[in-house]
Amino acid sequence: MYTKSLKLIVEEPKDRQEFSFIKESVEMSDGTKEKRYYIEGPFTEANSRNRNNRIYPLDEMVQQINEFNEKFVLQHRATGELEHPEYPNLNAEKACHLITSLKQDGNVFYGKSKILSTPTGKIVESLLRDGVQLGVSSRSLGCLDESTGIVTDFQLCTFDIVHDPSC
């Protein structure tokens, strides 16, 4: 029996400049105001060679995004970390953002994430307030054809906030 070997694959969209950082002031039930930070922009792309020279087929990407939305985003469980860990699973202790929406526009999938009040989320918030340019990068398992750069049989794990453009 042939078993495919899945490896951890991390990706970053082509242009970080497309990300918006939003600060909202929300009035709480006790009358106080709370500031919330969000990052919004293109989270991933299909049928196009990305910064890591990889291509994700659109049909597989649509399937994975739909499943991720159903299992994680709509259940308020779609967390991500700061930088990419070397493991595919989600670690709540290191969560820094909660993905609140993922929507398709052609081959691009746009997302919005709320920065959490966790210790790692506070680091992200500080970086954003101080003007550091951050981006979002996908984390998945999949099969990569090294000669073509095409990724197949992939399973989307999450999206992480990243600083290093070479990831």
Image (cartoon, rainbow, N blue to C red):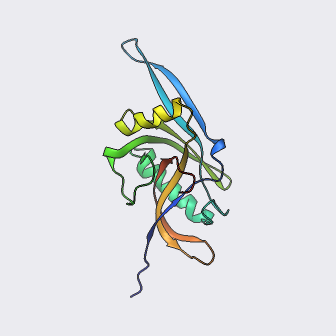
Q: Is residue 76 visible?
A: no
Which residue lies at the image location 52% right of the left edge and 46% below the top edge?
163
Image coords of residue 35 (percent x, y): 46, 23
Image coords of residue 116 (percent x, y): 41, 35
Q: How many marks?
A: 0
Which residue lies at the image location 56% right of the left edge and 56% below the top edge?
166
Query: Where is 102 relative to 126, above or below?
Result: below
Image coords of residue 156 (percent x, y): 47, 59
Which residue lies at the image location 35% right of the left edge and 36% below the top edge?
119
Of 12 and 48, the residue lying toward us? 12
Q: Quadrant of the N terminus?
A: bottom left
Residue 40 lies left or right of residue 49; in this view the side is left
Identity of the residue furthest to the left in this view: 93
Residue 134 lies left or right of residue 48; in this view the side is left
Q: Is residue 89 visible?
A: yes
Identity of the residue furthest to the top in this view: 31
